[in-house]
Image (cartoon, rainbow, N blue to C red):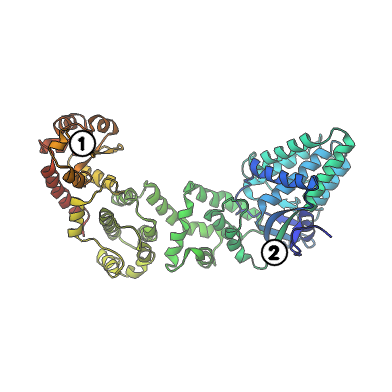
């Protein structure tokens, strides 16, 4: 009886797995092979415990799979599994067996051939385009082929394998990477740890093969329904290797054509890969707002179930085409680089990016721009809605309101106003939510005058917009925020004679005491008295705000800050209307 960790019939070794299934597929949705030195060391540790008779077997975790539909083009029954979770372990064990075959062929070619034919290749049969018993994901296939090409040469096993030569899947992905590096580690380890005498080497390699195929175990969970694969895949991972949302979505899309490798490869290369590349690793924030556009009541935990409903009658190409317009809007908001024909629309999106519009509003913004592009909403109305959204969010930010509760509004507000998408209707929907604060003019004016805004996220945007509102050129350069009256009060210096410590504390961080300055000029003027700062503002500042202040005010103190606060408050409520 085997000495395994459980008494479950589902605990298996890779020898058992290959007895139950002819071919193991790592679907193209899976991310590439990611194991490196750390994971290799874990595996070698497990091996060594068995070699040293400390353990009889080692448990590697769970392998989750579901059976693929039968391919009618292949003669005879070919039992194939798609791996939902466990590809890293299985692929490592597979190339480990391949490395053992490579090493043993130097001493016994027949033994090497037996390893390959028993564990690594399927017998020939009509209609079988790939005969490797494991088929990796697309991104690893060029590396997988490179490893097989290394063995299938005249110097190695080409002669021995001529009756049933290896036919790996078509190459895709980079020709070198984590998989080929791991194979090299295995070869190096086998060389280093093998004894010197030939017969002893053969016995050592055979013993290692036996451990790999029989003593490293896992629980094999075979799913009865492929549609639950994404839920299982989402929950399971091994040793902390994180699964991303895009991996799950890729799985959901390509599971529809997984039985057709040529169509899968073509769709992946021509449509999915360019689509995914556009995200530049920012994709995880896209899929939830995208799903909310179709079902505003969906929860994150229901995301993939809902995507299956949304995409029920669509093929992968149609699914990608459906997402593309929303992808562009999402990236425009996140990156702030829109490229629409309308200059006003571009500027409005740039503004939303600049205020770091909360992700809770993404479904609403994405839908507005989609409807404009589809000519279902006039450009004028769309821009008005986006401008109102900006005003609402800026006003809340000035008062320091958190985005709590915005998700409940904006996930489905488009559905409420779609028949008449006007600012009045949108405002009414917001006002009808008792839990959402809608700042009025009085509250905004008071916050501009009295609230400490120096550390508020909205303040750089306010300063930039005010600078743009003054006639003249506004530089696009980054700036620092300058406290005209310094942010620290020191007993006995010139500023302490102008304002009391208490009033200094109340006014120093208000918007009216802040202006944009270049980092260099800010560093140079810091605690200077205003008369000196004023001269440098006039001569050296590239920002109009600083030059304008120098022209308008000869002195700077409590009353000046109060006077400027009136100007700024009046400008704010005109710029971002109630």
Is residue 158 shown to the viewer in this render? no
The reply, left or right, for residue 199 in relation to residue 559 is right
Image location (x, y in percent) of residue 191: 78, 35
Marks 1 and 2 in Cβ contact (< 8 Å)? no
Question: What residue is disc 2 on?
Answer: 222
- The answer to whether 533 is drawn above or below residue 235 in the figure is above
The reply, left or right, for residue 447 in relation to residue 137 is left
Residue, x 66% and y 52% (percent of image)? 87
Image location (x, y in percent) of residue 152: 78, 40
Closer to us: 49 or 71 = 49
Element type at mark 2: strand
Of the residues under marks 1 and 2, which one precedes in the sequence? Answer: 2
Q: Nearer the viewer, mark 1 or mark 2?
A: 1
Q: CA distance from mark 1 to mark 2?
A: 73 Å
Name the disc covering residue 114, or none.
none
Question: What residue is disc 1 on?
Answer: 490
Is residue 315 shown to the viewer in this render? yes
The reply, left or right, for residue 468 in relation to residue 63 is left
Element type at mark 1: loop
Residue, x 15% and y 48% (percent of image)? 565
Residue count near mark 1 (Cα–Cα under 10 Å), binned few <14, some 14–19, many ≥20:
few
């Amino acid at each position: 009886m085997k000495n395994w960790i459980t008494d479950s019939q589902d605990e298996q070794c890779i020898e058992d797995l290959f007895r139950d299934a002819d071919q193991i597929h790592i679907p193209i949705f899976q991310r590439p092979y990611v194991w490196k030195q750390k994971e290799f060391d874990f595996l070698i540790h497990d091996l060594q415990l068995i070699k040293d008779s400390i353990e009889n077997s080692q448990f590697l975790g769970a392998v989750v799979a579901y059976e693929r539909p039968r391919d009618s083009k292949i003669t005879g029954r070919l039992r194939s599994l798609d791996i939902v979770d466990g590809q890293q372990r299985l692929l490592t064990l597979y190339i480990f067996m391949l490395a053992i075959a490579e090493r043993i062929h130097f001493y016994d070619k027949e033994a090497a051939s037996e390893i390959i034919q028993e564990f690594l290749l399927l017998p020939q049969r009509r209609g079988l385009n790939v005969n490797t018993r494991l088929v990796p994901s697309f991104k690893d296939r060029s590396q997988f082929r490179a490893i097989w090409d290394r063995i299938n040469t005249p110097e190695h096993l080409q002669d021995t394998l001529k009756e049933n030569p290896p036919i790996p899947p078509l190459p895709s992905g980079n020709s070198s990477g984590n998989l080929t590096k791991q194979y090299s580690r295995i070869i190096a380890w086998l060389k280093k740890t093998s004894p010197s005498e030939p017969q002893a080497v053969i016995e050592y390699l055979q013993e290692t093969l036996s451990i790999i195929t029989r003593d490293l175990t896992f629980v094999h969970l075979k799913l009865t329904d492929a549609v639950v694969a994404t839920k299982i895949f989402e929950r399971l991972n091994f040793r902390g290797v994180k699964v991303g949302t895009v991996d799950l979505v890729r799985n959901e899309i390509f599971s529809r054509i997984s039985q057709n490798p040529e169509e899968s490869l073509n769709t992946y290369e021509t449509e999915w890969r360019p689509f995914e590349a556009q995200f530049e690793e920012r994709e995880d924030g896209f899929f939830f707002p995208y799903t909310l556009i179709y079902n505003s009541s969906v929860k994150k935990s229901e995301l993939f179930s809902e995507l299956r409903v949304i995409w029920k009658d669509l093929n992968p190409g149609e699914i990608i085409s459906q997402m593309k317009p929303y992808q562009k809007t999402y990236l425009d908001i996140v990156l702030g680089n829109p490229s629409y024909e309308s200059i006003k629309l571009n500027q409005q999106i740039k503004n939303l990016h600049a205020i770091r519009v909360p992700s809770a509003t993404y479904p609403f913004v994405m839908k507005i721009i989609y409807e404009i592009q589809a000519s279902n909403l006039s450009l004028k109305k769309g821009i008005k809605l986006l401008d109102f959204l900006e005003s609402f969010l800026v006003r809340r930010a000035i008062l320091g309101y958190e985005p709590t509760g915005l998700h409940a509004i904006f996930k489905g507000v488009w559905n409420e106003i779609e028949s008449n998408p006007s600012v009045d209707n949108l405002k009414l929907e917001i006002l009808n939510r008792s839990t959402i604060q809608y700042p009025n003019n009085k509250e905004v004016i008071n916050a501009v005058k009295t609230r400490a805004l120096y550390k508020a996220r909205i303040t750089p945007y306010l300063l930039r917009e005010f600078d743009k509102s003054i006639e003249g050129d506004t530089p696009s350069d980054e700036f620092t925020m300058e406290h005209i009256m310094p942010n620290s009060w020191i007993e006995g210096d010139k500023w302490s004679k102008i304002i009391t410590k208490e009033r200094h504390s109340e006014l120093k961080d208000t918007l009216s005491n802040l202006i944009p300055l270049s980092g260099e000029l800010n560093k140079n003027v810091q605690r200077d008295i205003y008369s000196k700062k004023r001269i440098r503002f006039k001569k050296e500042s590239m920002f109009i705000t600083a030059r304008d202040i120098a022209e308008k005010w000869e002195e700077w103190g409590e009353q000046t800050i109060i006077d400027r606060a009136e100007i700024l408050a009046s400008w704010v409520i005109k710029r971002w209307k109630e």
